[in-house]
Image: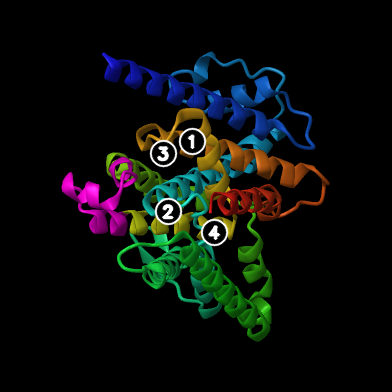
Amino acid sequence: MIFKKLKNKYAAIIIILSVLLIFCIGLFSTIGTANIKVSDTFKIVFSRLPYIKDIVDMGGISDSYKTIILNIRLPRVLLGVLVGASLASAGTAFQGMFKNPMADPYVIGISSGAALGASIAIISGIEISFLGISSTSLFAFLGSIITVFTVYFISKVKGKVPATTLLLSGIALGQFFTAIMSFLMVLYTRDMEKIIFWTLGSFSGKGWEPLLRITIPTILSIIVLNFFARDLNIILTGEESARSLGVEVEKVKIYILILSSFMTSMVVSISGIIGFVGLIIPHIVRLIVGPDHRILLPASALVGGIFMIFTDTIARTIISPTEIPVGIITALFGGPFFIYLLRKKKREI
């Protein structure tokens, strides 16, 4: 009976967040210099959906509004949802796995490793594709996977990963990779603008093509990551007790590291480095839904998507027509939050 009530509660939370996300997609696709109504935005989107497109009244909506929504704003907003969901999911998994409230893809250097890999692909001009994944994404994945395992093995002390060594290793390696990217910018000035893009993070100029390229692998990674929710719950009780309950802790960690690195590299290869999303969102969601990863992981993905498109809307409208890289906005939110967590951790010692 209790389990059934819990299941119904989780389902209700996911439904509410899903509806809120859909509303936010319509709302943030509407906001901009062109004076378009929210209702018109939903009509434009619904007019492209099968079965219901014939009953949508498109009277009074100009072709220019349709172009703005369908070709410019909607793909950008959907890409933001995908990026936010990926980074929040990875951050949630890392915090659960390391039992560390300050672990996220940006803080432990994975985003920097992915960005360096993408930068190397750009300057080398290598054009390869595997299962529809571009060379930039493949190099980003290689950079992220090298980073995460390097940080993990440097931080490991007597079979454990202490919070302090994890943070120091991640920050040091992230800064080292950022220095390499700066050096590459000096050597390859013709590609400097593209490399700077990776260090700031932005969705500017992104259409349907990059979104469609990463949608399937990223969504599949998020779904598969959710299958480890039970294992993460058990690991939170302690690795020894988790082993006694039949959880292969080291294998689970490796699977989660690979999945999280893969989804992070996919989105970083398109958007560049966007920090602190995976740090902030899991904490906010944990306060609302609790520490159970069965609800925490999917809820974090949905809230991460909402947060990402909210910050991107601020980035493109706050000093319009000039656009601020969205990585700057997330850092403005995340920096103070990270300091708060450090102070809280300090008081606990």
Question: Could you tell me how far apart the alpha carbons at marks 3 and 2 are, in whole angstroms?
Answer: 14 Å
Circle 2 — which element? helix
Residue receiving disc 1? 286
Neighbour tally class for label 2: few under 14, some 14-19, many 20 plus, Cα within 10 Å? many
Residue 106 drawn above or below residue 50: below
Q: Is residue 47 visible?
A: no
Looking at the rendered structure, the secondary structure element under dot 1 is helix
Q: Which mark is residue 297?
A: 3
**Is most of the magenta stretch helix, strand or loop?**
helix
Instruction: Work out whether residue 184 or residue 132 is closer to the camera in this orientation and state it.
Output: 184
Residue range (magenta): 232-255
Residue 153 appears at what percent x and percent y? 36, 71
| Sequence-earlier tag: 4 or 2 | 4
Judge the density around disc 1: few (<14), some (14-19), many (≥20) Cα neighbours within 10 Å: some
Q: CA distance from mark 4 to mark 2?
A: 13 Å
Secondary-structure class at tag 3: helix
Of callouts 1 and 2, which one flags the residue occurring earlier in the amino acid sequence?
2
Q: Residue at x 34, y 59 (%)?
A: 258
Task: Give the label, 4 or 2, closer to the camera.
Answer: 4
Dot 4 lies on which element?
Answer: loop
- Disc 3 and disc 1: Cα gap in Å? 10 Å
Q: Nearer the viewer, mark 4 or mark 1?
A: 1
Callout 4 amino acid: Tyr
Q: Position of residue 162 (x, y in %)?
A: 42, 62
The type of residue carrying mark 2 is: Met
- Residue designated by label 4: 106
Q: Gap between marks 4 and 3, in whole Å?
A: 18 Å
Q: Which quadrant holds residue 25?
A: top right
Which image quadrant: the N terminus? Answer: top left
